Amino acid sequence: ETGVTQTPRHLVMGMTNKKSLKCEQHLGHNAMYWYKQSAKKPLELMFVYNFKEQTENNSVPSRFSPECPNSSHLFLHLHTLQPEDSALYLCASSQTLAGSSTDTQYFGPGTRLTVL
Amino acid sequence: AQKVTQAQTEISVVEKEDVTLDCVYETRDTTYYLFWYKQPPSGELVFLIRRNSFDEQNEISGRYSWNFQKSTSSFNFTITASQVVDSAVYFCALSEAERGSTLGRLYFGRGTQLTVWP
């Protein structure tokens, strides 16, 4: 595997279900991100992790719970979602957030989530 | 206020035509980075280019070229001799690099849907 991978690619869940999205990066990066892309809305940054530490939570509802066990893996745990949470969830990684560096973010293929 | 504006929501061209996608940005930082990404129907955002604010030299990569003009805060993207495979949504993004900014945050435009017809 190369680059950034995400599983599953498609997910349909009911509002009472609990599911998790997985992201893995094979680039040796230290920073990872979750984005939400809804129809006709700009890409929304959800969470940022740098060296496994969460550095940003962009006012995301608590029904979304991120987990970063190491610099290569990022999870997004989902529970009691709403239909308006249906979207494409994209994971990205970059070399680092350190200092004034703003390294290029590389994206995975996304998970298309549908909440019924 | 939006930091990145892509005024063209949709563009349609016929194969072999040249097409320019506009991007206008807004920032108070003197050090910043500009990006273009391509999102084909499969969903993945594919990185195309990164340019820092101190390098105004235009860049060409095959059929792609980028025109960075600080005077007008624009970073436009031109595809020469477009092909059907160029059909995608193209996003322009800005990252600010100075103290006080949210390091690493990418501000995306709303994207331009490009359709190239055979």
Image (cartoon, coloured by chain):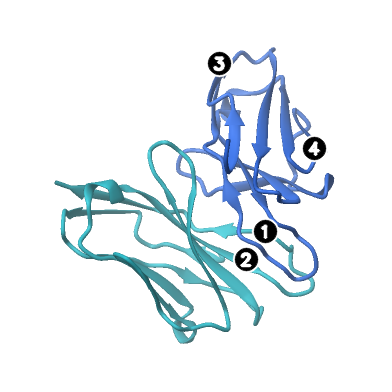
Chain colours: A blue, B cyan
**SS of the residue under disc 2:** strand
Label 1 in the same subunit as label 2: yes
Q: Position of residue B11 (x, y in %)?
A: 27, 55
Mark number, residue A68: 4
The residue that label 3 is drawn on is: A116
Which callout, 2 or 4, points to the residue nearer the camera? 4
- Callout 3, which amino acid? Leu
Q: Check whether the beta carbons of the residues at disc 1 and disc 2 lie within 8 A of each other.
A: yes
Which callout, 1 or 3, points to the residue nearer the camera? 1
Nearer the observer, A19 or A71: A71
Q: Chain of mark 1?
A: B
Question: Label 1 vs label 4: CA separation?
Answer: 18 Å
- Mark 1 closeness class: few <14, some 14–19, many ≥20 residues within 10 Å: many
Question: Label 1 vs label 2: CA separation?
Answer: 6 Å
Mark number, residue A27: none
Nearer the observer, B107 or A15: B107
- Mark 4 closeness class: few <14, some 14–19, many ≥20 residues within 10 Å: some
The residue that label 2 is drawn on is: B95
- Callout 4, which amino acid? Cys
Question: Label 1 vs label 3: CA separation?
Answer: 31 Å
Hey, which residue is sitting farthest front in the picture?
A1
Q: Say which residue appears at 59% left-offset and 71% top-offset.
A: B33
Hey, which residue is sitting farthest right in the picture?
A53
